[in-house]
Image (cartoon, helix red, strand yellow):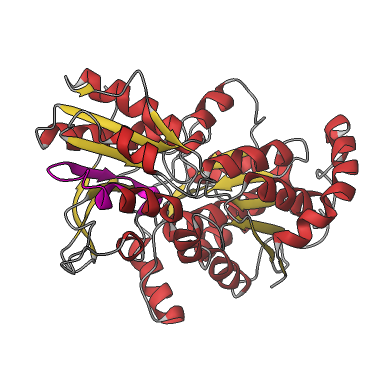
Amino acid sequence: MPKMNTALALSIATLAMGFLLGACENADNTNTTADSSQGLKIGSLLPATGDLAAIGQQMAGSVPLLVETVNACEGVNGQPVTLVEVDDQTDPRAGAAGMTKLATLDKVAGVVGSFASSVSTAAVSVAVPNQVMMISPGSTSPVFTEKAQQGDFKGFWARTAPPDTYQALALAQLANQKGFKRVSTVVINNDYGVGFERAFVETFEKLGGTVINKDQPVRYDPKAQTFDTEAAAAFAGKPDAVIAVLYAETGSLLLKTAYQQGLTDGVQILLTDGVKAPTFPDQVGKGADGRYLLAGAVGTVPGSDGKALAAFNKLWQAKKGSSPGEYAPQAWDAAALLVLAAQAAQENTGVGIANKIREVANEPGTEVTDVCEGLKLLREGQDINYQGASGNVDVDANGDVVGVYDVWTVEADGKIQVIDKVNPSPE
């Protein structure tokens, strides 16, 4: 399947932006008819490199696997689906350039991506005026809900991972259950980190807890190389726990700094989805005694409990000889919704997909867990209610879904183990 590294996309961004600006003024003529008579073309915009590569590489395999599956059962609207894959490098600038290429040169109707909320923020500003339907499998910032409510996305945005208002609630409940009364926060300074921080503080205080650095939050620059100041500030005041909302590459350096300075003694580390990768404990490293520095840390991550999960895991194992990684089910579901909506619309355009996303994802309709079965029913003119691998993917008016969360910990041997599941719901 066609691949384009974003380094090349950056080199053409200037040319592409010229007619992107024209598209902003003439949106009705952008993607509504482009390539409509040809086969469905979709893109993926995920981090194969950069700060989130460890997780991005785990999830990236889902989209081509979905396309392969769909093309083996007659494709969409009578033709094969084409996939164009772009590496967003976990970088907003690269993400915007990648989406510009996908929208204006490749003329895709829909995109699975991105993962980082900051990258999705940049990319969706390109997708919307070009009428490309964008479904993120992992951008969890609450900011997207707010922007959707304001009408910024015009229906061209959805996600298959729940917003961090729910994960913050899950983590706050976990901290409260463990008896932590005084905590501090340290977060990556972007949409994901700051949005999570604000939601956590609000929720934890409602539960009777105190965030001791609430008035002086610690937010680190994702491009920073050293973190001595941030580590010292996050662990100051002897908190019961430090809530660390990080990305793996930079976050590992920050936590290693804290351990090396002796700041972590007697302090529980609470983590989130941005670092739940098998390689993260090794990135943080071991102490002089050979023990993993991160052993005993606990975290949350959007989990998967969908009716299609067992079949998805079986397919992944058969094709790849391993188990799917974090967010792989969400990426599969994002791609599934794109193809099902295009079939429901009977047209291969972003407008058609955007108009049918909620129709194929929600009630009423026949419940289907198999994408090929869903396509078959849609070809016959029936309504469907897709039940995904990650969950039921009931998409609301803001493009949001509600999910469950896994509670995980780092064992003494450096392995990450899921130890519990929580299904938070707002009061």
* Count of picture labels: 0
Res. 165 visible in picture = yes
Horizontal side of 31 relative to 342 (left or right) equals: right
Horizontal side of 407 relative to 166 (left or right) equals: left
Asked if residue 43 lies in the magenta stretch, the reply is no
Q: Considering only vertical position in the picture, is 113 above or below 38?
A: above
Asked if residue 265 lies in the magenta stretch, the reply is yes
328, 49: nearer the viewer:
49
Q: Quadrant of residue 423?
A: top left
Q: Considering only vertical position in the picture, is 60 above or below 401?
A: below
The residue sitting at 34% across, 55% down in the picture is 276
Question: Which quarter of the rendered picture does the N terminus lie within?
Answer: bottom right
The residue sitting at 41% across, 44% down in the picture is 227
* Image x and y of residue 265, in percent: 15, 45
The residue sitting at 24% across, 32% down in the picture is 172
* Image x and y of residue 35, in percent: 83, 55
Q: Quadrant of residue 186?
A: top left
* Image x and y of residue 111, in percent: 65, 52
104, 246: nearer the viewer:
246
Horizontal side of 43 relative to 100 (left or right) equals: left
Name, please, the residue furthest toward the left: 179
- Residue stretch in magenta: 258-275
Question: Which quarter of the rendered picture does the C terminus lie within?
Answer: top left
